[in-house]
Image (tube, helix red, strand yellow):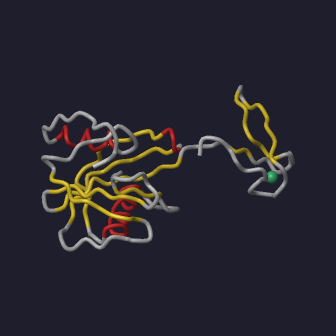
Amino acid sequence: MPENKMKFCPWCGNRLKMFEISGKERSICSDARCGYVFWNNPAPVVAAIVEHNGNVILVRSHGWPEGWFGLVTGFLEKGEMPETAVLREVKEETGLDGKVGAYIGMYPFYERNQLIIAYHVLSGGGEILLDSDELEDYREVPIEKVKPWPMGTGAALRDWLRTLGYEREFSKSPRL
Ligand SMILES: [Zn+2]
């Protein structure tokens, strides 16, 4: 959400107005006593490169363009650390118990105003049970074949492959 679409203050319900703070136009509450400012801070999102039986699990959310797949991702919950959140998301979305193998890095996703925190997660094995409320489909792609894509979580996958000695160009899109 790059711009503010809210018309009313989420704290007090009064109208929001534009106001310049430190040289930047911000959406603020029209009631000065309230003090709400829409800072539009990016949201931290965890992403998992799930390694499962020598494959990487890629998932596809409802409503994504045909053929697109990505990493398992999700928002942190209040009071949760990223390492905990990423394992919770893997469990919720794939049904797999996992453990964090390595922290891969942080990646900006400007289009969605998110900061992606990526981990390599080793699955403990077992059957994949897809969360059909959130996801439409998944693929298990052999590590020797999986290709990174040029947006969102793709750079994390490229960097992880590098740690294994695979130098792979970005594919043209997140399509498999
Ligand atoms: Zn307000």
**Foreground pick, 124 / 67:** 67
Residue depicted at x 50% and y 38%: 110
Q: Residue furthest top?
A: 23
In the drawing, does residue 31 fall left or right of residue 125?
Answer: right
Residue 122, given in percent of the width and then of the height, sits at 21, 59
Residue 61, given in percent of the width and then of the height, sits at 41, 59
Residue depicted at x 17% and y 34%: 167
**Foreground pick, 113 / 81:** 113
In the drawing, does residue 29 fall left or right of residue 89?
Answer: right
Total of numbered circles in the picture? 0
In the drawing, does residue 48 fall left or right of residue 31?
Answer: left
Q: Quadrant of residue 172?
A: top left
Residue 36, given in percent of the width and then of the height, sits at 75, 48
Q: Quadrant of residue 105?
A: top left
| Relative to 75, residue 131 above or below | below
| Relative to 172, residue 32 above or below | below
| Relative to 69, residue 127 above or below | below
Residue 133, given in percent of the width and then of the height, sits at 44, 71
| Relative to 94, residue 115 above or below | above
Residue depicted at x 26% and y 69%: 97
Residue depicted at x 30% and y 51%: 119
